[in-house]
Image (tube, helix red, strand yellow):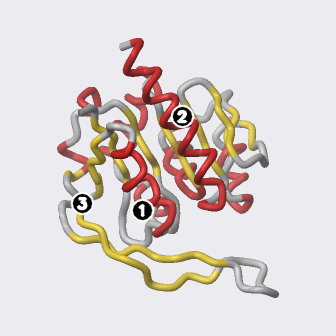
Amino acid sequence: MPAVLLVIGDASEVIDTMYPFFRLPEDGFEVVVAAPEVRLYHMVQHEQPPGWDITQETPGYHLQSDIAFRDIVADDYAGLFLSGGRAPEYLRYDEHLLAVTRRFMETGRPVASVCHGIEILAAADCLQGRKATSVAKCALDATMAGGEFVNEPVVVDGNLVSARTWHDNTPFLKEFVRMLHESQQSG
């Protein structure tokens, strides 16, 4: 069974993370949870309450990681999924994760990014000349890294598929799964 790396850290968004965690195996892909260390991580829920200009964060579920970023051999995996939440704010400083991200983008294997996941792509310098979407407050991350922010539910640019938030999960995962299957057939 081909494996997909699911990148998390403390404060990864619950729905951004758990939807692909359960959805990808339904289509024949093993999910390998990757994080700074192998341990239990604390996820969060984000919701924009009525009258608020920004999301409210509350504690969510926990998820055990399977592999530390430093131990990943990128070529062993069919795809990369960059989850959202606040975790990418600090994960983007991990040189091992940035190297893995660059390797996926350079080799053309499917990469999925939702919400704040774009911060990892920006830090890895993988958005130059690319179209992508994310939560609107991360549009600057795309443009400052040389990309074009597109405010649509799902944006595909080559091997990169991106979504704004967990609200776009159904079309987002449908596209990522399609890309994974096509990549497996051509590889």
Query: Which badge, 1 or 3, is on the more N-terminal residue?
Result: 1
Q: Is there a contact, CB below 8 Å, between mark 1 and mark 3?
A: no
The residue under label 1 is: 18
Is residue 153 positioned above or below 19 on the image? above
The residue under label 2 is: 126
The 10 Å Cα crowd at callout 2, few under 14, some 14 to 19, many 20 or more, is many
Tell me residue 134's x, y (percent).
Answer: 66, 52
The Cα–Cα distance between marks 1 and 2, rounded to whole angstroms, is 25 Å
Looking at the image, the residue that sits furthest to the front is: 26
Label 3: which secondary element: loop
Q: What amino acid is found at the position of numbered circle 1 in the picture?
A: Met
Q: Which marked residue is nearer to the observer: mark 1 or mark 2?
A: 1
The 10 Å Cα crowd at callout 1, few under 14, some 14 to 19, many 20 or more, is some
**Which residue lies at the image location 27% right of the left edge and 43% below the top edge?**
30
**Which residue lies at the image location 77% right of the left edge and 46% below the top edge?**
152
The 10 Å Cα crowd at callout 3, few under 14, some 14 to 19, many 20 or more, is many
Q: What amino acid is found at the position of numbered circle 2 in the picture?
A: Cys
Query: Which badge, 1 or 2, is on the more N-terminal residue?
Result: 1
Is residue 45 positioned above or below 143 on the image? below
Q: Who is closer to the viewer here, 4 or 75? A: 4
The quadrant of the rendering that contains the C terminus is: top left
**Which residue lies at the image location 46% right of the left edge and 49% below the top edge?**
82
Q: What amino acid is found at the position of numbered circle 3 in the picture?
A: Ser
**Which residue lies at the image location 20% right of the left edge and 51% below the top edge?**
67
Q: Which marked residue is nearer to the observer: mark 2 or mark 3?
A: 3
Residue 57 sits in which quadrant?
bottom right
6 left or right of 132 in image: left
Q: Which marked residue is nearer to the observer: mark 1 or mark 3?
A: 1
The Cα–Cα distance between marks 1 and 3, rounded to whole angstroms, is 13 Å
The residue under label 3 is: 65
Q: Who is closer to the viewer here, 71 or 58? A: 58
Tell me residue 103's x, y (percent).
Answer: 38, 28
